[in-house]
Amino acid sequence: MTTAEKLIERLGELGRTCGTAESCTGGGIGSAITAVPGSSAVFMGGVISYDNSVKQGVLGVSPETLATVGAVSPETAEQMAVGARRLLKVDYAVSVTGIAGPGGGSAEKPVGLVWFGVATPTGTKTEKRVFPGNRAEVRAAAVEHALSLLLAAAE
């Protein structure tokens, strides 16, 4: 059973819902969830906030956050998850923002760096990962990790 299948099963058992706020994964998390039959009972939708204007205007990431710490940061990931939870009216929301490569990295923020946010009824947490590999591998790893974070939040 895939992580997405486990997530759909668990949320169904709980009668809970989820949604996503994606940047570097470009909708991959939502795609993985909706590939599972029955996902419509628990998945409400997602926001692909690739550009900062969408992070700010749709999800409510503060302009100060984007200006001071940037899009790839724990603060942005947290605000994206909270915004998705509010906007989509879901129990659980996961966010991803990162640098999939091959360019765009720096010493402080290398290619493969992804920040995750998970907003739940009891609060929000963030997590940092640096995934090895090319663009496709980084994105695939980020999708799988985001699904596992949602599943863990629903346990």
Image: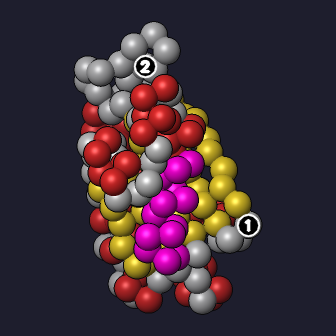
Where residue 11 appears, as percent x and y from the top left, is 57, 80
Start-end of magenta stretch: 78-90
Say whether residue 65 is visible.
Answer: yes
For the point 49% across and 15% down, the residue is: 108
Q: What is the three-letter code of the residue carrying label 1?
A: Thr
Seen from the viewer's position, the closer of residues 75 and 139 is: 75
Q: Secondary structure at mark 1?
A: loop
Say whether residue 145 is visible.
Answer: no
Image check: 60 left or right of 125?
left
Where residue 71 appears, as percent x and y from the top left, is 41, 35
Disc 1: CA contacts within 10 A as few (<14), some (14-19) or many (>=20)? few
Please tell me whether mark 2 or mark 1 is closer to you in this view. Answer: 1
CA gap, disc 2 to disc 1? 32 Å
For the point 36% across and 31% down, the residue is: 99
Image check: 58 left or right of 11?
left
Q: What is the three-letter code of the residue carrying label 2?
A: Pro
Q: Which residue is mark 1?
A: 122
Q: Which residue is mark 2?
A: 110
Where residue 30 appears, as percent x and y from the top left, is 35, 65
Magenta segment's dominant SS is: helix
**Which quadrant of the figure has residue 109?**
top left
